Image (cartoon, rainbow, N blue to C red):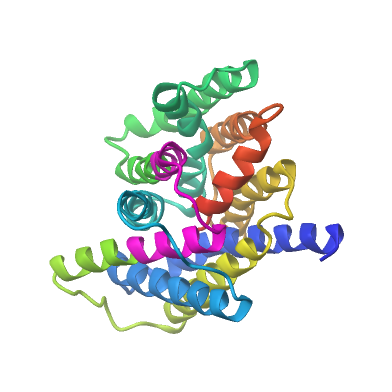
Amino acid sequence: MSDRAAHAQVFLVALLWGLNWLASKFALADISPWFFRTLTFGVGAGNLMLASRWWGTSMAIAKGMPRLHLAVAGILNIGGFGIFSAFALLETSVARTSICAYTMPIWTTLLARIVLEERLTRARTGALVTGTSGLAVLLWPLFAEGIPIGALYALGAAVSWSAGTVYLKWSGVQGHPLAIAAWQLVAGTCAVTIGFLVDGADFGNRMDALSAAGLIYGIFLGTALAYLLWFNLVGRLSASAAAMGTLMVPVVGVLASIGFGERPDEADLVGFALIFVASLLALWPAGSDRKVTTRNQARAGSGT
């Protein structure tokens, strides 16, 4: 694959994941979050398993603690992120959910400093300061109307995703990136399926055409195809391409939500701008950190 083709796929994945925020909002109007995530993650995991057989990729992970570590990472990276973001979409706008959820690089910077003792470079310090300022601008007006439960769910998704990323790096699990991604999706699927059953196996309401379209998109395009394309790119992406691909997702999500009638207010836009800059700083480490960042992004994924 040429560099031009690889970069085109990065843009395509960002588009698929960005539009998936809006598609998920539509689907969740008539289907329970637990059932929605069980379907999307389950099909996504199966798709990666089939791809691994087609490509002849080893799915082997060492027995014992490595498998346990991968399961924990999957519950955080996939299950926690997915279910928190789904509930966020029920409580607040697509734009606000995607903005808050993609504070993930900021929380990763903080957790990596605490858990992994990674040093805070000027860029990372700037990311923390700018990101905190962006969240303050975004959330402060919301607290005047009460506890912004939707935004807090979205922040929970970001923290869960970042915790899974840092945990995976700390554990040092070895394996092909496709295998690491697929088994995390399996773990995440198991977690949300348990939640679905405990919640009473609620399948949601009778679906209208828009909700059905959102569900179909979320299963086959936003999860199955997007993950397949993303992990087909692993090893071909530079750190800068991976970073920009990740940052494009909330941009697409916000623009798509505006196109379908949502109107972010001034606080949303200013907060989004500050958080975008903070994420750019956090995702753009210097020197040898770049390869690690690319690998962690590939393992953790970036979809909704």
> On the rendered structure, is 291 left or right of 163?
right
Q: Up-down: is 29 above or below 277?
A: below
> On the rendered structure, is 15 left or right of 60?
right
Q: Residue at x 60, y 76 (%)?
A: 56
Query: What percent of the width, then of the height, locates residue 113?
Result: 46, 22
Which sits in the foreground, 38 or 178? 178
Is residue 214 in sight in this rendering? no
Q: Quadrant of the N terminus?
A: bottom right
Numbered disc total? 0
- The magenta stretch spans residue 179: yes
Q: Residue at x 37, y 34 (%)?
A: 142
Which sits in the foreground, 264 or 241? 241
Is residue 272 in sight in this rendering? yes
Magenta residues, dominant SS class: helix
Query: What percent of the width, then of the height, locates residue 46?
Result: 45, 77
Query: What percent of the width, then of the height, locates residue 163?
Result: 39, 39
Question: In the image as oriented, which residue stretches furthest toward the front?
Answer: 63
Query: What percent of the width, then of the height, locates residue 111?
Result: 42, 28
Q: Residue at x 35, y 42 (%)?
A: 156
Which sits in the foreground, 215 or 285? 285
The magenta region covers 161-188
